[in-house]
Amino acid sequence: MALYAIGDLHLSLTADKSMEVFGPAWKDYVSRIEASLSRLTAEDVLVLAGDTSWGIDMAEAEADFRFLDRFPCRKLLLKGNHDYWWSTVSKMNAFFAEKGFTTFSFLHNSCHVYGSHAICGTRGWFFEEDQKPHDAKVLNREVGRLETSLRAAEGRPIWCFLHYPPLYQGYECREILEVLARYPVELCCYGHLHGPAIRRRFVGEQGGTTFSLISADHLGFIPKKICD
Ligand SMILES: [Fe+2]
Ligand SMILES: [Fe+2]
């Protein structure tokens, strides 16, 4: 039994948006995901840190979830900026039940207990979002979701998963970092950074939390092991 995490699978089995156009890092990425996820067992837990499917709705994402559901590990999904299929947890759970997909749960205003730790997370916030209108409202909502998830840990040590990096060369999201600092967050993994942006990632410790990038192309499509 082990806990793994990876972000940004960007599956596109129905939607015509293969990531292979982004160069050699993405070559044969679906086969590489297939090879690495095949090694996980039904006792393993895999956090998928957003940008899981390019599908614009559940119908278009169905083939991507069918592909993922074939691997027996339990999968915890959180939302990325490209997960347009995301709706309400009850609607998404109903869709999975109707299709007979049994391996998915959501990390959304909630936490999951793993051994003595809690797995928490939400989409988060990044400077790209600052350029959009009504950003304060959306930022506050994300900060609230993060706090709800961290509070649900009820004092357990926390592994937190965000889609957006709260720290980046020349950028930090103070609102998100302040919430993280108020809880016993040992590790914060994030995705979203691809290609040349990976160079500007923050890796290391700040305020008692270790930060780590888990976007799929950065990990070579092999999920990072968080804990046995
Ligand atoms: Fe992404
Ligand atoms: Fe993203």
Image (cartoon, grey):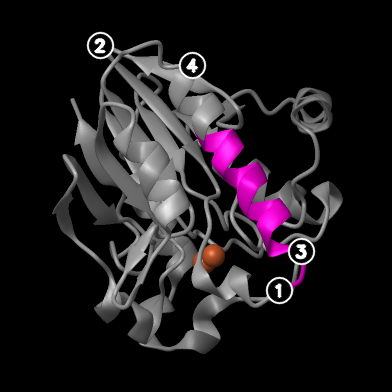
Earlier residue among tags 4 and 2: 2
- Above or below residue 120? Residue 116 is above
Task: Tell me, yes or no, whether the highlighted magenta stretch contains residue 15.
Answer: no
Task: Tell me, yes or no, whether the highlighted magenta stretch contains residue 145.
Answer: yes
Q: Which mark is residue 116?
A: 2
Q: Amino acid under label 4?
A: Ala
Nearer to us of marks 4 and 1 is 1
Earlier residue among tags 2 and 1: 2
Is the residue at mark 4 in contact range of ligand 2, meaning its CB lies under 8 Å from it?
Answer: no
Q: Amino acid under label 2?
A: Ser
- Above or below residue 106? Residue 115 is above
The N terminus - image quarter = top left
Residue at the spot of label 3: 134
* Distance of label 4 from label 2 (alpha carbons): 14 Å
Asked if labels 3 and 1 touch by Cβ distance under 8 angstroms, the answer is yes
Report the magenta residues as a range. 133-146
- Above or below residue 83? Residue 172 is below
* Distance of label 2 from label 1 (alpha carbons): 39 Å
Residue at the spot of label 1: 132
Q: Amino acid under label 1?
A: Lys
Of residues 175 and 86, the one drawn nearer to the viewer in this rendering:
175
Residue at the spot of label 4: 152
Nearer to us of marks 4 and 2 is 4
